[in-house]
Amino acid sequence: IRKYRVDPKLEKSLVGTYCVCHNISYNEVCLFLRNMKSIKDIDGLRNYFVISDKCKLCTPDIQKIVEFYNKQP
């Protein structure tokens, strides 16, 4: 089974690789957003993941990931 990885163009703009507070990898978030085109913002993503709500250090990265996948056809 091939594991999904963050798109190389997107990966270059990210600071971290996972949500420190909840240990959710950016790979998991990317795979989910790639398959769920209806998610348009972090609040929509929070319906499925507990992410970016304690220290908020991952918020800029999560925002970049959401925006990247919203631009994909």
Image (tube, rainbow, N blue to C red):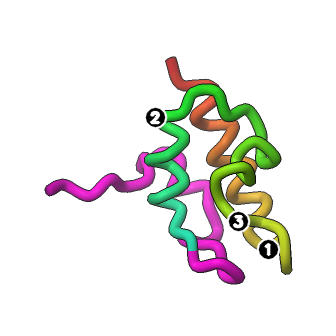
The answer to whether marks 3 and 2 mark residues whose Cβ atoms lie closer than 8 Å is no
Which numbered dot is residue 57? Answer: 1
Residue bearing mark 2: 35
Q: CA distance from mark 3 to mark 2?
A: 18 Å
Q: CA distance from mark 2 to mark 1?
A: 25 Å
26 in relation to 40, above or below? below
For the point 64% across and 73% down, the residue is 19
For the point 64% across and 27% down, the residue is 38
Q: Quadrant of residue 33?
A: top right
Q: How many numbered marks does the figure carry?
A: 3
Magenta run includes residue 40: no
Magenta run includes residue 13: yes
Residue bearing mark 3: 50
Q: Quadrant of residue 61?
A: bottom right
Residue type indicated by callout 2? Asn
Task: Report whether 53 appears left or right of 35.
Answer: right
Task: From the top left corner, tell me how far across and down residue 2 is, in percent.
Answer: 19, 54
15 in relation to 5, above or below? below
Task: From the top left corner, tell me how far across and down residue 68 is, in percent.
Answer: 61, 37
Give whichever of 36, 25 is nearer the camera. 36
Q: CA distance from mark 3 to mark 1?
A: 14 Å
> Tag 3's secondary structure?
loop
Magenta portion: prevailing SS class: loop
> Tag 2's secondary structure?
helix
Q: Along the polypeptide, which appears first: circle 3 or circle 1?
A: 3
Mark 2 is surrounded, within 10 Å at the Cα level, by few (under 14), some (14 to 19) or many (20 or more) other residues, namely few
Question: Which part of the image, by quadrant, shows the N terminus?
Answer: bottom left
Residue type indicated by callout 3? Val
Stretch in magenta = 1-23
